[in-house]
Image (cartoon, rainbow, N blue to C red):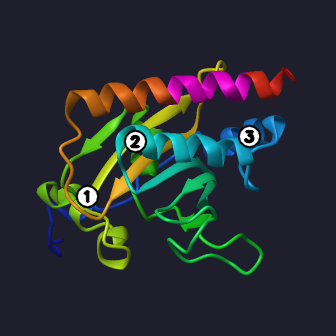
Amino acid sequence: MPHASYDPTSHLLLTPEDAEAPARVVRLRELGIGDSPVPEFDDFARNLARVTGAPYAMVNFIDEHRQYFAGLYTPGAERAVELGPAPATAQPGRVMARDHGYCPHVIVRRKALVLEDVCDYPRFAGNPVVDEIGIRSYLGAPLIDRTGMALGTVCVVDQEPRPWGRQGLETIKSMAAELVDQIHRREHGA
């Protein structure tokens, strides 16, 4: 009988399965978000970066295959810059593969995630963004819609380890709730 080798770390680096993705895509289409930049979300990302002191901030919506930064702030730029591979049809820097970064974990967990130094966590240290972009710290929270669905995330990242602490966690959670309220106002045309 053949013996299969077992690698106890192999499951740690996988992007989590996201059974909610097809329904999320439908909900995002209803809301008219997730596939083009939204100036208000760029403003939100800029404010999020300012409040947290982080150089990069994103409002991220995730489908079955990719992540889309409908809101993006990068240091020293009033426009998006390249953060990852983007197809010719997308704005530069607005698209990232679903297996890159930590937002897919946040959306499946439905809980905020604080990584002060991603290299301290074997599950996250092997993520492509560490080597390709130099990301060392992450702070993100899910955007939980009134329907109970996780629509996306808000997050900040840095290329240096950051002591986000409890204050960072509370800030990202309250900012996520603020953005969900803004999304609901958009939905109702307010």
Single out the mark in the foreground, 2 or 3.
2
Q: Residue furthest bottom?
A: 88
CA distance for labels 3 and 1: 27 Å
Q: Residue at x 41, y 37 (%)?
A: 51
- Residue 123, percent from left and from top: 22, 56
Q: Are marks 2 and 1 in contact (CB under 8 Å)?
A: no
Q: What residue is shown with label 2?
A: 140
- Per the image, label 1 sits on a secondary structure element best described as helix
Say which residue appears at 36% left-offset and 40% top-offset.
52
Mark 2–mark 3 distance (CA, rounded to whole Å): 19 Å
Percent x, y of residue 34: 71, 49
Q: Main secondary structure of the magenta part?
A: helix
Q: Is residue 180 located in the magenta-colored stretch of the structure? A: yes
Quadrant where the C terminus is found in the figure: top right
Name which residue lies at 18% across and 55% down.
117
Q: In this figure, which residue is indicated by the disc labeled 1?
A: 124
In primary-sequence order, the first of circles 3 and 1 is 3
Of residue 185 and residue 147, the one placed in the foreground of this image is 185
Image: magenta residue range: 176-184
Q: Nearer the viewer, residue 78 or 139?
A: 78
Point out the tag, 2 or 1, that comes first from the N-terminus: 1
Classify residue 157 by image quadrant: bottom left
Q: Nearer the viewer, residue 140 or 146?
A: 140
Q: In the shown orientation, is residue 173 left or right of residue 32?
A: left
Q: Which residue is mark 3?
A: 28
